[in-house]
Image (cartoon, helix red, strand yellow):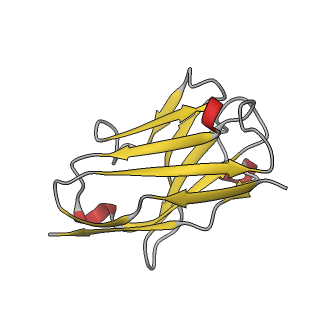
Amino acid sequence: QVQLVESGGGLVQAGGSLRLSCAASGRTLSSFAMGWFRQAPGQEREFVAGISWNGGNTYYSHSVKGRFTITRDNAKNTVYLQMNSLKPEDMAGYYCAEVPAREVPTTEGAWRYWGQGTQVTVSS
């Protein structure tokens, strides 16, 4: 059974940075695409970033492109989300997800496994 555990969330001032980590256990994630999603109170879950199985392709939502960077280290079974120039509107619970495919899917329903989430709070 795949377990995904996020870490790295916390409280930062606007303009600051955080790096989120998602560590997998139970099996290696080296063959599968990974993604980050977020959900703010009263809002729908939103795709943030995705990365193909070998890191060759990355995708970002318009709101974070140029500020966030998704990377992965398959040897460590970990995916990261570097968040720079944080804004108050970035405040949300952030969730790591895995899809049983090599490439990032176009539909959110394809994502199979989810972590418990880590909270990111940005003060103005």
Of all residues shown, which one is farthest toward the bottom?
42
Using the rendered image of the protein, determine whether residue 46 is visible from the camera's viewpoint: no
Residue 55 figure quarter: top right
The residue sitting at the front extreme is: 76
Left or right, residue 6 beside residue 53: left
Determine whether, in the image, residue 102 is placed left or right of residue 9.
Answer: right
> Quadrant of the image for the N terminus?
bottom right
The residue that appears at 75% across and 30% down in the rendered structure is 31
Q: What is the residue that sits farthest to the top in this orientation? A: 56
Q: In the image, residue 22 lies at what x, y percent?
A: 56, 51
Q: Give me the residue at 56% from left, 20% from top.
A: 56
At 68% from the left edge and 49% from the top edge, which residue is drawn?
Answer: 24
Quick one: quadrant of the C terminus? bottom left
Camera sees residue 8: yes
Decide: is 4 above or below 120.
above
| 61 over 93 or under it: above or below | above
Q: Position of residue 16 (x, y in %)?
A: 20, 54
Q: Position of residue 93 (x, y in %)?
A: 46, 68
Res 12 quadrant in image:
bottom left
Residue 34 pos. (x, y %): 63, 41
